[in-house]
Amino acid sequence: MTVGLPHFMALSAVLFSVGLYGVLTRKSTIMALMCLELMANAVNINLVAISRFVTPAEMTGQFFAVFSMVVSAAEIGLGLALVIAIYRRRKTVELGAMEELKG
Amino acid sequence: MGYVVLIPLLPAIAFAALAPLPRSVRNRALGVAVAAVATSLALSVAAFLAVTTEAGHGADVAYHASVVFAHAGSAELGFGLLVDPVSAVMLLVVTVVGLGVQVYSLGYMHRDERRGWYFAVLSLFTAAMLTLVLADNFLQLYLAWEIMGLCSYLLIGFWHEQEAPRRASIKAFLTTRVGDAGFAVGLLIMYATTGSFAYDTVLGGLAWAPGAATAVALLFLFGAMGKSAQFPLHVWLPDAMAGPTPASALIHAATMVAAGVYLVARALPIFEASGVALTVTLVVGSVTALLGGLLAAVQHDIKKVLAYSTISQLGYMFMALGVGGFAAGMFHLVTHAFFKSLLFLGAGVIIHAAHTQDMREMGGLARHLPVTTGTFTIGALALAGIAPLSGFFSKDEILTVLLHEHQYVAFGVAIAAAFVTALYVARLWFRVFTGPVQSEGLREGHAEMLAPMVVLAAITVALGFASPAFGEFVAHHGEWPAPLMALTSTGVAVGGLLLGWFIFGRRSRVLNTRVIKQRTGPLYDVLVQKYYLDLTYDYFIVQPYARLASGLWRFDAGVIDGVVNGAGALWRQVARLGALVDARAIDGVVNGVGTAVRSAGDRVRRIQVGRVQVYQGLMAGALLLLMTWVIVKGA
Amino acid sequence: MLLSAIVFLPLIGAAVVAMLPASRANGARWLAALVAAADLVLATVLVVRFDVGAGFQFVEMAEWVGQVGIGYHLGADGISVSMVFLSALLTFLAIVASWRIEKRPGAFFALLLLLEVGMNGVFLALDFVLFYVFWELVLVPMYFLIGTWGGPRREYAALKFFLYTLFGSVFMLVGIVALYLHPAGGTFDLLVLAEAGLPASFQWWVFAAFFLGFAVKVPVFPLHTWLPDAHVEAPTAASVLLAGVLLKMGTYGFIRIAMPILPDAFAAWQPALAALAAISIVYGAALAFAQTDLKKLVAYSSVSHMGFAMLGIAAGTAEGIAGSVAVMFSHGVVTGMLFLLVGMVYERTHTRMIADVSGLSARVPVAAGLLAFASFASLGLPGLSGFVGEFLSLLGAWGSTMWPGWVVIAAVGVLLAAAYMLWMVQRVVLGVPSTAVEGIDDLSGRELFALVPLAVLTLVVGVWWDSLLRFVDPAARALAAVVGGG
C-alpha cells in the first residue's frame, strides 16, 4: 500500500482534532499548551505533505512549516513563562480558576 | 401740533425717571409725576382747542402722525397719534382726572413708605391710557390696553404684604387677560380680513363681510367685557377695591374700565356691519346695568357699592353703544368719569375719617365733614340722575336713544336700573351722612384731598349743559333731552331716592324718636301706625328685595366667581396631573429605554464568562459553522 | 475671515485657558472673559456691517475633503446674525455671572468657550458635515458642565441630555447621508441642496429623520423630558446657554435646513408641526404652573415658549417665520435673565423652592424688580420683546393654511403663561419676606453688569420691533416664498 497524500491529511486531521479536544477540555494550563502544540504540529504535517505531493519542485510548504516551528517555539516559551508567573501568584495553573475577565 | 407726542410721553418719562431711583429719593420726587400730568393736561387743552377750531372749519381730524415700528412679511405695524373730537375729549378726561387723583394722592398717601413707586405706576398708567386714546390703529390700542392691565395689577396689589390685595391683583390681571385673549384673536381675524389694523383702513368705508365683522366685533366685545367689568367677566372689579382708593378712582371709575367702552365706540362701524354684535352688546349692557345696580344695593362696604355701581353704569354705556348711540355712550363715559371719581375720592376721605369701610359703622358724617358731604352729594345726585347735574343729561341721552331705536325692553331695564341706582345712592347717603355718629375723631380731609373733589364737583354741575354741544362735537348731532323724557327719568330717580329715604333715612329717625314717643302720648298711636307701615314696607318691599339681591350676590360670588375660582383650581389639578404624566409616562418611556438597554446588556454580558476554554470552544464552533457554510455554498 | 474668527476665536481661548495651571485661576477668568468679550465685539461688527437687504454675506468657501464633496462653507444671513449675536452676548454674560465659581474654574471657563465654538459654528455653517460637527460639538462641553458642576442628580441629567440629543442627531446624520447619496442631491452644501429638486416622497423620509434630530433639541412635545432635568441640575451659566442658545439650534435647524431643502415635505408635515407646537405651548404652560421648584418652572416655560417658535415655523408664512425668530431671540435674552436671577437667588438663599422664597421685594428690591421685569417679559407683555415674537407667530399662523383652532389654542396659551408667571411673582417677589430671604444682599455691580444689557435689549426690541426685524424679515420672506407661503 502506497502512503499517499490522503493518509497524511487524515493523520493531520486526527492529530488536530485530538489537540482541539485537549485544548478545550484539559484542566491544566500546561496540558492545554501541549495540546496547542499538537494542533500546530498537525498543521505542519499537513503543510509538508501537501507541498511534497502536489508541488514537489517548490518547497513552499516545507519553508512555511519551518517558520511555523520557529514561531511555535517562541510562543511556547512565552506561554510557559506566563504559566510560571501565574503559578507564582496563584499557586495553581488550573484554567477554570482564572475568571478575572468575567463580564 | 407736534407737541401732541408729549402728551403721553411726559408721564412715561416720569415713570422712567422715578422707577430706577432708590426708595428714599423717589419718595421726595413726587413732584415729577404731578408736573408731568399737569403739563399733559395743558397740552391736552391746547389739542382740544385745536380740534374745536378744526371742527369749526368742518374737518374732523386736527392732527395725525404715525411711524412704522415693525416690518414683518406683509405687515407694516405703526405707532400713531390721532387727534379727533373723540380722542380730544378723552385726553381732557384722562388728564383732568389723572391730575386730580395725583394731587389727592399727595395727601392720601403722604405717610406711605412706598408712595414714590405708587406715583411712578400712576404715571405709567396715565401714559398708557393717553397712548390708547391717541391710537390710530387697533394694535396700538391693544398694546396700551395690556400695559394698563399691568399697571392695574401693580396698583391693586400695591399693599402686597397682605393676602387680599395679592389675590385681587392676580384675579384682575387674569380675568381681564381672558378677555384680552379674545381681543387678540379678534385682531388676528381683522388682519387676515383687511390686512391692516389702522382705523383709516379698517373703519373708513371698508365693506366688511357680515361673518368676519361679527367675529371681530364679538371678540372685541369680549375683550371689552373683561376690561370694563361686564357680566360675566365683572368679578375682578369688586375685589380690586383692595387697592388704594385714589387708584380706584382713576382706574376703576374714569379710565381703565372706560377703555372697553372706548374700544367698542371706536370699532362701532364694524359692529354696525354685523347686526348680531350690536344686539349682543345691548343685551350684555342691559343685564349688567340691572345686575350691577341690584348688587350695589346690598353691599355694606362703601367701596364695593361704588364698584358695583361702576359696573352698572358701564352697562348703561354698552346699552347705548348697542343701539348705535355713539354720542350718548361717550357722553355718559365722560360724565361718569368725573362724578364717579369724585365719589371714590370722597369715599377715601370718608374711610380715612371713619377708620372703616363698613357703612353700618358709619353715620352722621354730614356735620363733621362739610366739604366732603357737599361734593359727595353732588356726585351722588349726578349718579342718581337728578337734574340739572351732568349724570341726568347723560343718562337721559341714553334713554332717549334706546327709545328712538325702539328697544323697549332695554328701555324698561334701563328705567328699572335707574330706579335701583337712585335707591342705593340714597341708601349709601343716608347710612353714611345721617344718623348717630359712630366714629371718633371725625376730621375733614387735607386741602390737597379736597381741592380735586371740589373741581370735579364743579365739572359735574356744569358739564350737563354741554350735552348738545358734545353730541354735535363728537357725532355731528346733538340735542337737549325731550321734556317728557326728562320728567320720566327725574320722576323715576326721585322715586328711588324717596324710597331710599323711606327705608334707610327714616329708620334712624324713628329710632331717635323713641325718647320723644314716651313723652308724647297722643302721638304714640300715630307713630305706631307709622311704625306698622314701616313694618309693612319692610315685609313687602325691603325684605323680598334684600332676599333677591343677596341671592343674586351669592349667585355672583358663588357661581360666577366660583367658576372663576373653580377654573383656577381645576387648572391647578390639570397641571399637577400633567406633571405626573410627564414624569411617569413620557419620561418613563425615556427612562424605560435606558433600563431596557441596561437589562439587555446584562443578559448579553453573560457570554463573558472569563474562562478561556469557553471562548476557545465558541471560536471553534463558529469556525466549524463557517467552514460548513463555505463547503455547502461551494457545492 | 470675520466668520471664521467668530467661530474659532473661542476655541483658541478655550485651549489656552485649559492649559493654565490651577494656581492661575484668576488669570483663567480674566482671559476667558476677555476672549468672550472679543468675540462679542466681532459679533457686533458683524451686526453693524451686515447689509440687511443682501442675502448671505461674509461667505467663506474652501474645499475640505474634496473627494467626498465636503466643503468648509460659512455664511451669514439676517437670521444667523441675530443668533450669533445672541450666542456671543450670552456666553460673555454667563462668564461674568459665573465669576466666583470655586471648583476648577479653568476647566469651567474653557468648557464654556468650547460651547461657544459649537454654537457659533452651527449658526454660520453652510455645509452639512460642518454643521453636523458643530452640532455634535456642543454636546461634550454641556455634558461635562452639567455632570461636574451640577446639582445632586447631575450624572443622571447629563447622561440623559447627552444620549437623548445624540439619539436625535443620529437620525439627522442618516438624513444628511441620504441627501448626499441621492442622485438629485450629491452634495453636502446647504445652498446647493436648496436649489435641488428632490422628489416629494424622498423628501418626506428625510424630513422625518431631520425632524427627530431637531425636535429633540427644540424641544417639541413629547420629546422634551430631558429639558427639565438638564436645566435644573445644570450650573447657572450652563442653564443660561442651554435655554438661551442650544434650544434655538433646533428651530434654527428647521429654518435653515428642513424648510429650504425639503419644501414639499414641510407642506406635508405642516399639520403635525402645528399640532405639536400648540400642544407644546399649552402643555409646557400647564406643567410650569404645577412646579414647586423655581428653576423647573422656568424650564417648562421654555418648552411653552419654544412652542410659539414652532408655531411660527409651522405657519410657513413670512410673518410666522419672522415671529419664530423673534421668539427665539427674545426667549434667549429673557430666559437668560431669568436663569441668571434664579441662580443669584439660589446663591443667597440656598433654596430653589418657591415655598421657601418669598417677599424678595422687601429685602432685595433691585433683584426683585428685575425678576418681575423678566417675568413680565416672559409672559409676553406688550412693550417688551416677548410680545413681538408671540404676536407675529400668531399673526403668521392665522394667515396660513393650518387649522385655525391651533392658533386659538396658542392664544389661550398666552393667558396660561400669565397664570404661572404671576403665580410665581406673587409668591416669590411679593408678600412677606420668608426666613430664607432675611439678611441677604442685593445684586452686586458685577451681577447688575450681567443683567442690565439683557434688560435693555428686551426693552429696545419690545418698543422698536424693527431693531430685530430688520435682520430677520428679508430672510423670512425669502424662506416663505420657497415654502409657498404655507
Image (tube, rainbow, N blue to C red):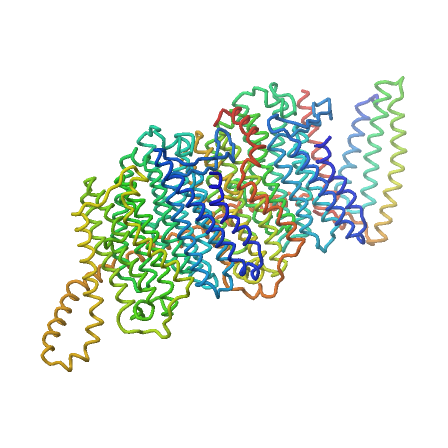
- Front residue of this view, candidates B338 and C273: B338
Camera sees residue A7: yes
In the rendered structure, the answer to whether residue C179 lies left or right of residue A50 reads left
List x then y, in percent, for residue B542: 19, 64
Quick check: C317 above or below B558?
A: above
- Front residue of this view, candidates C340 and B168: B168
- Front residue of this view, candidates B551 and A85: B551
List x then y, in percent, for residue C483: 51, 25
**Quarter of the image that includes the N terminus of chain C:** top right
List x then y, in percent, for residue A67: 89, 30
Quick check: B619 above or below B558?
A: above
- Front residue of this view, candidates C103 and A70: C103
Q: Residue at x 77, y 44 (%)?
A: A26
Quick check: B180 above or below C254?
A: below
List x then y, in percent, for residue B410: 21, 46
Q: Residue extending furthest bottom?
A: B519
Camera sees residue B580: no
| Total residue callouts | 0
In the rendered structure, the answer to whether residue B25 lies left or right of residue B119 reads right
